[in-house]
Amino acid sequence: MEERKFEQLLLSVQKPGRYSGGEDGSIIKDKENKIRFAMCFPDTYEIGMSHLGVKILYSLLNSREDVWCERVYAPWIDFEEVMIKNNIPLFALESRDELKKFDIIGFSILYEMCFTNILNILKLSNIPLLSKERTSLSPLVVAGGPCTCNSEPMADFIDLFMIGEGEEVINELIDLYKESKKSNLSKEEFLIKAAKIEGIYVPSLYEAEYNENGTVKRYIPKNGAPKTVKKRIIKNMDESYYPKKFVVPYTEIVHDRAVEEIFRGCIRGCRFCQAGFIYRPVREKSIDTVLEQSKALCESTGYEEMSLLSLSTSDYSNIECMLEKLLEYTDKNQISLSLPSLRIDNFSKELVEKVSTVRKTGLTFAPEAGTQRLRNVINKNINEEEIFKACKTAFGQGYLNVKLYFMLGLPFETDEDIIGIAKLGEEILNLYYKNENRPKGKSPSITISVSCFIPKPFTPFQFHPQNTEAELIRKQELLVKSVKSKKINVKWHDSSTSFLEAIFAKGDRRLGKVILNAFNHGAKMDSWGECFNKEIWLNAFKEENINPDFYAYREIDYNEVLPWDVIDIGVKKEFLISENEKAKQALTTKNCKEKCSDCGALCYKSGICLNKRTKSNT
Amino acid sequence: MVEITDIRIIYKKLGKMKFVSHLDMNRFFTRMLRKTKLPIWYTEGFNKRVYVNFALPLSLGYESLYEVMDFRITQNTELSVIEEKLKEVLPESIVLIKAVYPKMKSKEIASAVYNIKFYDVNLTESIKKLLEQEQLLTLKKTKKGIKEIDLKPNILKYEVNKENGNTVLMLKLPAGNTLNINPSLITDIILKECADGSNNDICYSVTRTVLLNEKDEVFI
Ligand code: SF4
């Protein structure tokens, strides 16, 4: 299509900057003799451009001379319409070439509700959706990201999955691809070889058998594929690749700032939290690395804001020292530093003040459950005193807003726990009024944000059913009724997508046809309220004769073979079972810093597992 | 005491940059200026930010051969050094023409000249005829609501020419704080009246070529 016609079409849609490319830091290369990689994020530009994992892999791949990696995002519906009407296939932002011309199409899968967007990206590129219908080596369709720790629901569509952290395995994959392309290997031959790379899961090399009751009987590997695929991790974070430059967008995106990842993994092991298990063990970057990488990024991008990234940031070993050094640099260079998930209680007052000049937005806590008993059940090691102490400090500094995150529908939850959420909110509110230094004439507000618990693979709670929708609604109503003060706001997420998330999180490959059916009937952008249509999905289950309740509402037996048993994330199933047993008795488990609980992640021989401390005997 | 100096840069905004809105340009230049490591002046107060000021907003989708932006520096720096540093960081679709010390105030801007290229040679005659009419009525959105205005007296100057198989319309329109006429008001009429309905996807592009003051001097 002529450039001027294309530009005119762009100007007819919302936010044309999403599709124009040419951002500062985007990489243009000569097409000759390159492996061309399309890095696809199956959601909008604004969300995809904010994601660190994609930024890392984009820079990493482009640091190779033999690869040109470009970016692709899901077009918003207005532009999709224009594309279809004018016969424009989906293109990569850098070269504006259609995806068919690429060697490898890679998807980053962060959440279940983007499955249909993956199919839509392929469809808009006129690429067959089913892996078995794509017979040639190119384009090869690959995927990675946290959601792929159970990749089974997408097994029909994706040629291979990279399990775990991608920085190393993606290079090995490209090397193999390059070699295979040169020697004219068929797609099948290539996949058999690829399956031998640690961390690569080729679903077509496994045959699934099922029991009469519908559960998985076994997976039979073929052609020398391994029985289980072991997650890859970066052992030494100081030596691993980190971008010196980001693509800096012109238009507004969700997180538009320099980001420094300070560690991977989480020491805590909250029993509902998938990230807390699949990223084990904790591996930190040294302070020097953090400083050096932060400076390089800020200088190359010109960003006036930077944030640190990790799970539970304040668990970084020497955070106070690191922050002091970092603040020295950011202050001098007019950069505002923001910290996610900071636990205010372990900091000196000066430090809190320094960081808070950056973000006066308010204080957030995630107690997740309303009573200490239930917090013990879920192993959320935060107690009321800690919350109260932190709130007092915050109110003393002039904060007015406190936001609390909770989950409804947790295993072993009773109505008392739900009423406890309201009580906690009220006690925090009382604290505000007891504070003598509170700002005069201002009104505090407490927000209670509740989401629905979704049992996720590789967590101790994977065995539990999700609450039915009716039950969740009853619990929401109970919570709202229990909140007496008008200064406390209750917000909750729609439970209808949670139901689907639960199904696909723990789903198997039989769900592929449901996804395809829903997609063919118009499902896309399912994580967007204005696009999501539950009826399409329910109908798809009916038409494909699959009972969704089986996946969401069934209690899983410890002895059952699970669709994700084919993946080995380091943490052993026995550990998850023992954690679930402890949950039953409301017993907590110490975090990795205090004591090693022998979860299995030691097999990676890195990070916190190698710390010198007594090993658990229990 | 730091000595604060106003610096004005004149640049072209071309190619893909046309998709960057006026609001986004602010953020863009903030980052570019920070990257230069020049002694940039920040606004005072709680939320310190790089001070940048654009002489006249440019609509999304338009290119320009003459954009004007002001910022401030806190240490005396040669204009040539400023130019050099900026050229190092700017993308190819922002072409720096020069850095100067401001001579005029933004409010002195009185008119702007636009080059509108229609990729259709057959439009030449009909555009001429249209613009020869005594009145050119259209609806314009104002703060008080929609009102009908006559564009004819606002077209300070125009020229219609054939050029390499295209129709090029040069328009000089009032610009600035008091009265600002966007050329889209006129292109809309042209597409409606001259494109005889059958050919509704005529492509055109708009380039602002210069900003002028009351005396028709180039704004600088
Ligand atoms: S092996 Fe021990 S230290 Fe390592 S992640 Fe597991 S519990 Fe933590």
Image (tube, rainbow, N blue to C red):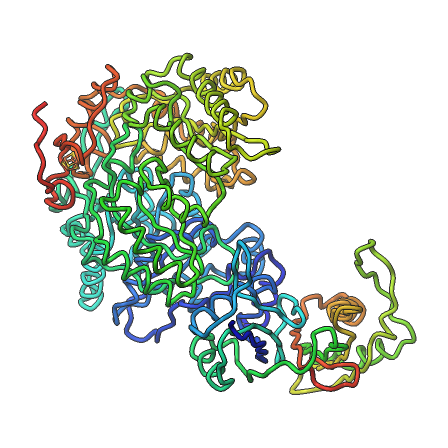
Q: Is residue A92 visible?
A: no
Q: Going 15% across and 54% down the picture, which residue do you hit? A: A193
Q: Going 33% across and 19% down the picture, which residue do you hit? A: A372
**Residue B54, horizontal then vertical, whole percent:** 63, 70
Q: Is residue A557 visible?
A: yes
**Residue A370, horizontal then vertical, whole percent:** 40, 20
> In terms of depth relative to the viewer, which is nearer, A228 or A257?
A257
**Residue A488, horizontal then vertical, whole percent:** 54, 25
Quadrant of res A246? bottom left
Q: Is residue A594 left or right of residue A73?
A: left
Residue B190 to residue A552: above or below: below
Q: Quadrant of ligand 1?
A: top left
Residue A297 to residue B97: above or below: above
Q: Quadrant of the C terminus of chain A?
A: top left
Q: In the image as oriented, which residue stretches furthest toward the front?
A: B1
**Residue A155, horizontal then vertical, whole percent:** 30, 42
> In terms of depth relative to the viewer, which is nearer, A251 or A608?
A608
